[in-house]
Image (cartoon, grey):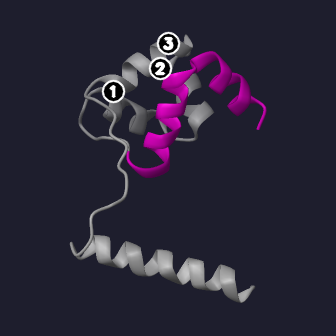
Amino acid sequence: MKRQMFEELLGSVREAGAILRGRQEPSRRIAIPASGVRVIRERTSLSQSQFAHLIGVSVKTLQNWEQDRRRPTGPAAALLSIIAHDPALAVKAIGRV
């Protein structure tokens, strides 16, 4: 690994640690509003099973999100934001992977 890349990675790990300990605020946070996951899925015209398979989560996880028992975080929240922005294009792009 090149030194510069290592230093950037180490800096990211240190920043994550500071955020976890409450010494630093995250630079950004993606929040999906309550019941937003269902609306996003419905805009794709996919069933729960199809949508869960598309984004790589279990149907149970998707149901928990849709029923507001849990909230998507991290990469899942980012992916849902992308799908919400342009459902048809996102489904087309993800479906190719």
Q: Is residue 49 left or right of residue 65?
A: right
The percent position of residue 29, horizontal first and vertical second, equals: 35, 49
The percent position of residue 75, horizontal first and vertical second, equals: 49, 49
The amino acid beneath tag 3 is Arg
Location of residue 44 with respect to 83 vertically, above or below: above
Q: Residue at x 64, y 16 (%)?
A: 88
Location of residue 38 with respect to 33 vertically, above or below: above
Asked whether disc 2 touches disc 3, contact meaning CB atoms under 8 Å apart, the reply is yes
* Residue position for label 2: 41
* Residue position for label 3: 43
Cα distance in 3D space between marks 2 and 1: 9 Å
| Magenta run includes residue 75 | yes
Secondary structure of residue under mark 1: helix
Q: Earlier along the polypeptide chain: callout 2 or callout 1?
A: 2
The amino acid beneath tag 2 is Arg
Cα distance in 3D space between marks 2 and 3: 5 Å
Q: Is residue 77 left or right of residue 24?
A: right
Q: Nearer the viewer, residue 25 or 92?
A: 25
**Which residues lie in the magenta part?**
73-97
Secondary structure of residue under mark 3: helix
The percent position of residue 37, horizontal first and vertical second, equals: 38, 26
Mark 1 or mark 3, which is nearer to you? 3
Q: Residue at x 41, y 81 (%)?
A: 14
Which label is found at residue 95?
none
* Residue position for label 1: 66
**Residue farthest to the bottom, as pictured:** 3
